[in-house]
Image: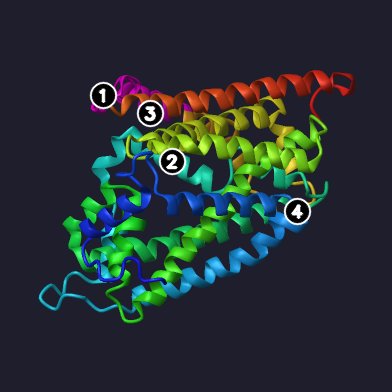
Amino acid sequence: MVGEYEGITSQAGMSQFLAGFQGRDASWGVSGVAYLFFLVTMALNTWILSGGIRKGTERAASWGMPVLIGLSMLLAIRVLTLDAPEPSHPENHVWNGMGFLWNPDLSRLTDAKVWLAAAGQIFFTVSVGFGVIQVYASYMKRDDDVVVTGLSTTMVNEWGEVILGSTIAIPVAYAFFGPQGTAEIAQGGAFNLGFATMPVVLQQLPWGAVFGTAWFFLLFIAGTLAQLALMQPLITFLEDELEWSHRTSVLLTSTLVFVGAHVPILGLESGALDEIDFWAGTFGITLFALVETVLFIWLFRPEHAWQEIHRGAQVQIPRVFLWLLTYVTPLYPLGLFLAWAIQYRPAVFSMTGVSPEDVPWRWGARLLLVGFLGMMCVAVHHAWKLRGAQGGLR
């Protein structure tokens, strides 16, 4: 929109531009412009959260989600109507890119890392494993239809993420860079695809500035709504269980996020963000989803859980799903962890292949997560003691 990366026509050039924007060559590890936007974003999120669920998060979502879906549909339509950019390679077409994306590579089915990454992704996108779904569910009435609400939520989410999201990035990258180039880009991760490849592709299209602005604004809205959702569980816990004021809960949560964010910001080049993404966004979220499943099914008892699911429901779930919830759902992540431990645990824990100068930042990221986990345990223990007279946590 402001023309900062206009004229950069290669992925390598865009990666270099982003490296400068991120401050990888700066003396203290981050550029002033990037840090300024970080401060603005933190202030915006804190302001939204200060309005509470209805006046803050709900208003942001009611405005942000339609814009997010609208921009996604605009970009998806533009991608699907794109001809082969290089006439000498007519096979590099977006529809062949769809085949590149959706034709399975069956040889990867024995790779535990693929299954664990997929589990972490689906748990994150439906807000399972880190308290978000429980927070929003707590605002439902006792006889609200959980079945229809759950089905509609997952269907809309997967339509937006799988159908719209998958239609945009990989197929258009295939059209411009071919199968080999797209495979290399995909191996570089979502960050490389979203911030180094897509800007180069979009600016080569007619009205490229418009589509580039739409792409980055889409990412900004998605990131903002995700951060609001991730911060809400701690705010709700502090209010409901420790009886703190909403203002104090928001300020403490924002302060913790602000301080903790400096580890991935300053250690970005050393892989601190990758460590946090794996241990919190893949491994941790799958582990907590397993714990939630065991608590809901085995401690609450399967029949009680089944009755609670159908309280006020207009649709009867087939009985086979009770068997799936009881046995398959907990055994699946257990099997993933066992397979991952056999294939990858030694290399991951010993940081095999990590350069020596990056090791301190990666351990710093791990210690940050351990510290947050420790604080969470202390807070839960304190809340348990506080609510002891009423029979424990509410």
Give the Cα separation between the discs numbered 1 and 3: 10 Å
Q: Which mark is residue 51?
A: 4
Q: Decide: few, some or many residues near mark 4? Use Cα within 10 Å; few <14, some 14-19, many ≥20.
A: some
Among numbered discs 1 and 3, the one appearing first in the sequence? 1
Q: For the point 47% across and 59% down, which residue is it?
A: 219
Q: Nearer the viewer, residue 138 or 294?
A: 138
Point out the residue furthest to the right here. 389
Q: Which mark is residue 265?
A: 2
Among numbered discs 4 and 3, the one appearing first in the sequence? 4
Inspect the image, locate mark 2, and give the three-letter code of the amino acid beneath it: Ile
Residue 394, image x and y in percent? 81, 30
Location of residue 269 with respect to 227 vertically, above or below:
above
Question: What secondary structure predominates along the stretch shown in magenta?
Answer: helix
Magenta range is: 334-355
Q: Secondary structure at mark 2?
A: helix
The question of residue 352 being in magenta is answered with yes
Q: Which mark is residue 356?
A: 1
Give the Cα separation between the discs numbered 3 and 2: 11 Å
Q: Nearer the viewer, residue 175 or 340?
A: 175
Give the Cα separation between the discs numbered 1 and 4: 45 Å
Q: For the point 78% across and 48% down, which residue is it?
A: 139
Q: Is residue 239 left or right of residue 292?
A: right
Give the Cα separation between the discs numbered 4 and 2: 27 Å
Q: Secondary structure at mark 4?
A: loop
Q: For the point 55% across and 35% down, which residue is it?
A: 259
